[in-house]
Image: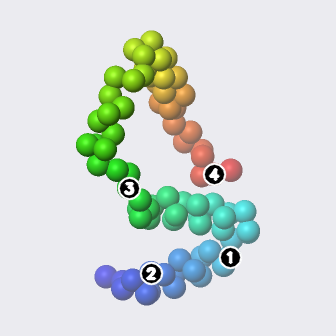
Amino acid sequence: MATSSVIVQQIMKHIDQLPLDLQQRVLDFTQALVPSASQGVPGKQLAHFAGLIELDDIQAMSRAIEAGCERIDANEWIH
């Protein structure tokens, strides 16, 4: 099994060979993998917002999410 430093060296070797635009995509991808320091707030702090959004608005948001977020682009990383 490779150590962390060996893996980092291998990754760097491959990244150095990529054009700048692909290096940026790798950076974006790795940043998305690392959990941010701020993961949100406890639900208790949000409880006072419960019921403030109208049901029609919630349903419209749900439809928009279902229409736009349920698609998979199998070629997304190939461009």
Q: Earlier in the sequence, mark 1 or mark 3?
A: 1
User: What residue would you read off at disc 2?
Assistant: 7
Between the C-alphas of marks 3 and 2, the distance is 27 Å
Q: Residue at x 32, y 33 (%)?
A: 48
Q: Earlier in the sequence, mark 4 or mark 1?
A: 1
Q: Nearer the viewer, residue 79 or 46?
A: 46
Q: Earlier in the sequence, mark 4 or mark 3?
A: 3
- Amino acid on which the number 2 mark rests in the picture: Ile
Between the C-alphas of marks 1 and 3, the distance is 34 Å
- Amino acid on which the number 1 mark rests in the picture: Gln
Between the C-alphas of marks 2 and 4, the distance is 23 Å
Q: Nearer the viewer, residue 27 or 15?
A: 27
Circle 1 Cα neighbour tier, 10 Å, few/some/many (<14 / 14–19 / ≥20): few
Circle 4 Cα neighbour tier, 10 Å, few/some/many (<14 / 14–19 / ≥20): few
Where is 46 relative to 68, above or below?
Answer: below
Circle 3 Cα neighbour tier, 10 Å, few/some/many (<14 / 14–19 / ≥20): few
Is there CB contact under 8 Å for labels 3 and 2? no
Where is 10 relative to 24, above or below?
Answer: below
Q: The residue tagged with tag 4: helix, strand or loop? A: loop
On the image, the x and y values in percent for residue 18 come to 68, 71
Is there CB contact under 8 Å for labels 1 and 2? no
User: What residue would you read off at disc 4?
Assistant: 78
Circle 2 Cα neighbour tier, 10 Å, few/some/many (<14 / 14–19 / ≥20): few
Position of residue 21 in the picture relative to residue 5 (left or right): right
User: What residue would you read off at disc 1?
Assistant: 17
- Amino acid on which the number 4 mark rests in the picture: Ile
Q: Which mark is residue 39?
A: 3
Position of residue 21 in the picture relative to residue 78 (left or right): right
Residue that sits furthest to the top in the current view = 56
On the image, the x and y values in percent for residue 31 come to 52, 63
On the image, the x and y values in percent for residue 30 come to 51, 65
Q: The residue tagged with tag 1: helix, strand or loop? A: loop
